[in-house]
Image (spheres, rainbow, N blue to C red):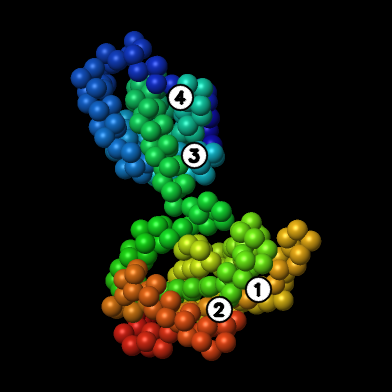
């Protein structure tokens, strides 16, 4: 990349919004106030950046805008990279809020660079608030013990996946795993040992799930695995692979080897499903697996009616 017009990666803070170029010919003081007010309307990170990008593009010609925050593993890229780059480190009271890069094929004028500084300064406080909100949402969607997605996240997202499956005729499957006789582990070794077993199970399920799968702890000793673009045969293979990961493999706790098994229910999405109905069907499949002797996988036969076919 040609760096003949690169702005140093200097820190942009919210304090810069009051500096001398507020009266710039490019953006009036009233216009800047309106711009800042629009940014403050959003707590959602992506809505905030969509608005910022649209406002910036409406004011200054640019080819690409890229944002990255390593602390939250957030990356956003808009457009194709141009030859000339200006790069900024965004900070609020010394706290890093990530880095932003703006490029285009022609050089930025000094007036345009000043204006970018002003607009980025207006972004700082809304961005700080959006990142905080994003982090709060992430924490609320994580199970405290295992770090997996929780049941709340499942219910927030799975109906969208059902709608996507119907629209594009791309089926998915859901696995439900339940520890066999988990209450006996708690009674024999104590609740702390039970937590260790749950954590061990979570790691083993994650280790055998595919990269595109999503693993949840749905509460207690129940785990879910969302399998995108997956029908019965492949879902059964994944379920067996996960079940085998715990077979005859003990969880060590306080000089004790705690052995356990899993029962699994497998369902594939149908046209009549909702997030709740999928759970109900998987739960019934688990029930059948338990009745048949535990430590086994049961596929919901009702799944064969109304399947979403590719």
Residue at 26% x, 35% y: name it: 41
Residue at 49% x, 34% y: name it: 98
Category of crowding for the residue at label 4, using alpha-carbon neighbours closer than 10 angstroms: few (below 14), some (14–19), many (at least 20): some
- Residue situated furthest top in the rendering: 20
Residue 260, label in figure: 1
Give the quarter of the figure containing the C terminus. bottom left
Q: Which residue is mark 3?
A: 68
Horizontal and vertical percent for residue 255?
A: 79, 61
Q: Is residue 133 left or right of residue 211?
A: left
**Residue at disc 3, secondary structure:** strand
Horizontal and vertical percent for residue 90?
A: 47, 28
In primary-sequence order, the first of circles 4 and 3 is 3
Q: Are marks 2 and 3 in contact (CB under 8 Å)?
A: no
Q: Nearer the viewer, mark 1 or mark 3?
A: 1
**Residue at disc 1, secondary structure:** loop
Relative height, residue 295 to residue 254 (above, below): below
Residues under labels 4 and 3: Cα distance? 16 Å
Category of crowding for the residue at label 3, using alpha-carbon neighbours closer than 10 angstroms: few (below 14), some (14–19), many (at least 20): some
Residues under labels 2 and 1: Cα distance? 10 Å
Residue 263, label in figure: 2
In primary-sequence order, the first of circles 1 and 3 is 3
Residue 225, label in figure: none
- Quarter of the image where one finds residue 182: bottom right
Residues under labels 1 and 3: Cα distance? 43 Å
In primary-sequence order, the first of circles 4 and 1 is 4
């Amino acid at each position: 990349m040609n760096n003949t017009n690169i702005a140093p990666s200097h820190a942009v803070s919210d304090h810069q919004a009051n500096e001398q170029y507020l009266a710039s010919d490019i953006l009036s003081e009233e216009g800047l106030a309106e711009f800042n007010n629009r940014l403050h309307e959003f707590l959602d990170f992506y809505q905030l950046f969509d608005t910022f990008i649209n406002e910036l593009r409406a004011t200054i010609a640019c080819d690409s805008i890229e944002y990255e925050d390593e602390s939250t593993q957030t990356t956003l890229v808009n457009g194709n990279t141009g030859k000339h780059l200006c790069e900024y480190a965004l900070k609020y009271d010394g706290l890093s809020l990530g880095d932003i890069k703006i490029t285009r094929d022609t050089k930025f004028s000094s007036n345009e660079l000043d204006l970018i500084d002003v607009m980025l300064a207006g972004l700082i406080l809304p961005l700080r608030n959006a990142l905080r909100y994003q982090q709060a949402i992430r924490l609320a969607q994580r199970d405290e013990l295992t770090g997996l997605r929780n049941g709340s996240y499942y219910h927030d997202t799975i109906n969208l996946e059902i709608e996507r499956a119907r629209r594009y005729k791309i089926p998915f499957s859901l696995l439900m795993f339940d520890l066999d006789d988990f209450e006996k582990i708690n009674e024999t070794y104590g609740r702390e040992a039970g937590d260790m077993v749950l954590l061990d199970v979570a790691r083993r399920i994650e280790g055998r799930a595919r990269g595109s799968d999503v693993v949840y702890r749905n509460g207690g000793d129940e785990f879910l695995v969302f399998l995108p673009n997956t029908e019965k045969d492949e879902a059964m293979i994944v379920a067996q692979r996960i079940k085998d990961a715990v077979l005859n493999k003990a969880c060590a706790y306080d000089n004790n080897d705690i052995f356990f098994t899993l029962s699994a229910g497998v369902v594939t999405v149908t046209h009549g499903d909702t997030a709740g109905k999928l759970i109900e069907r998987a739960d019934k499949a688990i029930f059948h697996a338990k009745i048949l002797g535990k430590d086994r996988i049961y596929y919901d036969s009702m799944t064969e009616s109304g399947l979403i076919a590719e």
